[in-house]
Amino acid sequence: MKGIYIHIPFCASACFYCNFHFSTAKKFQKDFVQALKKEIILKKNFFTENTIIDTLYFGGGTPSVLELGDMEDLCSFLHLHFNLKSLKEFTVEANPEDLSLNKLKKFKELGVTRLSIGVQSFNESTLKYLGRQHDGKQALKSIENAQKADFENISIDLIYGVPTQTKAIWQKDLETFYQLNLPHVSCYCLTIEDKTPLALWINQKKIKPVDDDLSVCHYKTMTPIMFQKGYVHYEISNFAKHTYYSKHNLIYWQNGAYLGLGPSAHSYNGSFRSWNISHTSHYINAVNNHDTLTESEKPDKSTLFNEYIFTALRTMWGVKWSKVKTVFGENYYDYLNKKMRHVQMQHMLEETSEGFRISEKGKLFADKIAAHFFVV
Ligand code: SF4
């Protein structure tokens, strides 16, 4: 599978927890779109000629803040330079306040097949703590509009572990999600990133800090009900009804090749990793002045092995012995086997027909478990 990711670095305002690369300065949007088109030309040979692209993903930032004309322009341009005729999935990330019926119908015409809506919560106090622009009603309305526009493959993001979010509030968010009968949800635990307003206010003791016990309680509330409702916990933060797994994200998790375009976007061609300047106006200048836009590196075998272990253990497919042997060789295979035999956390792991994965119980400690197997 091959994918293209487009990073749209604009947001209407800054959420209090966010440390992604984005800008609220609308004045750069037109220049950005032109620069992105130039980057598309620069990187059109990233894949060999006529390679069939399986997935296209507009992420951000907030792609839904783009004007429809710009979105249309970018889609036509991408079609001109890449083989997108057999796309299996075309996802656009969107915020509820942007999703008018008119915009959604246009997305449909442009070939968008999947929406990832940044709902985060349906509860007003949670949304307020997070600094989101929408309210619960708008979140519901955006989903209703998406369904009216004939979107079936809809995912929403939800956040748990928010200090103002009682267990009852979190359960209500989950119940609302089940009632909507959507096929996919990404549930993220709130983490406080450096240099965000939340980090500052917690430091100044103006707001409640996050509490690990609360996050664990929310996680434990969520997983059994998800199973009951028929959702597969296919990646640590992602649940889906069967066949609705995010195909684009599977490319990342299964070590496939992808091209990232736009500021801060990352690419991988099977041997080299590269990443773009993480600053919108510097990105625009670099493209226009033919300056260095992208840095790259060829990761060594042990880095690739550690990355494989880390990502594979986050998914339900887990680590595959055959892959370890064929991709990394006998030495890595023997090393992993030995580590497995001496592991102190057997109850956190379970065997699969092809290898091993983290058990439901172990998922709360996934990073720690993966680190145990790293080559240092
Ligand atoms: S909309 Fe998304 S990318 Fe933009 S500030 Fe909020 S969390 Fe960050």
Image: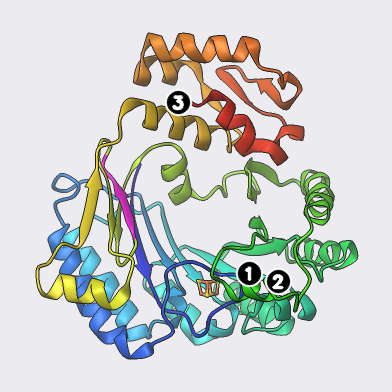
Mark 1 crowdedness (10 Å alpha carbons): few <14, some 14-19, many ≥20 = some
20 above or below 319? below
Residue ID at (55%, 9%): 338
Residue type beneath disc 3: Val
Residue type beneath disc 1: Ala
In this view, the residue farthest toward the front is: 204
Tell me which secondary structure the magenta stretch mostly adopts.
strand
Foreground residue among 257 and 159: 159
Does 143 lie within the magenta span? no
Residue labelled with disc 1: 199
Which of the labelled discs sits on residue 202, or is there none? 2
Q: How far apart are the alpha carbons under marks 2 and 1? A: 5 Å
Indicate yes or no: mark 2 CB to ligand 1 under 8 Å. no
Q: Position of residue 214 (x, y in %)?
A: 83, 56
Residue type beneath disc 2: Ile
Q: Position of residue 204 (x, y in %)?
A: 70, 76
**Numbered range of the magenta stretch:** 265-269
| Quadrant location, the N terminus | top left
- Picture quadrant where residue 107 is located: bottom left
Which of the labelled discs sits on residue 212, or is there none? none
Mark 2 crowdedness (10 Å alpha carbons): few <14, some 14-19, many ≥20 = some
Q: Position of residue 226 (x, y in %)?
A: 77, 49
Which of the labelled discs sits on residue 376, or is there none? 3
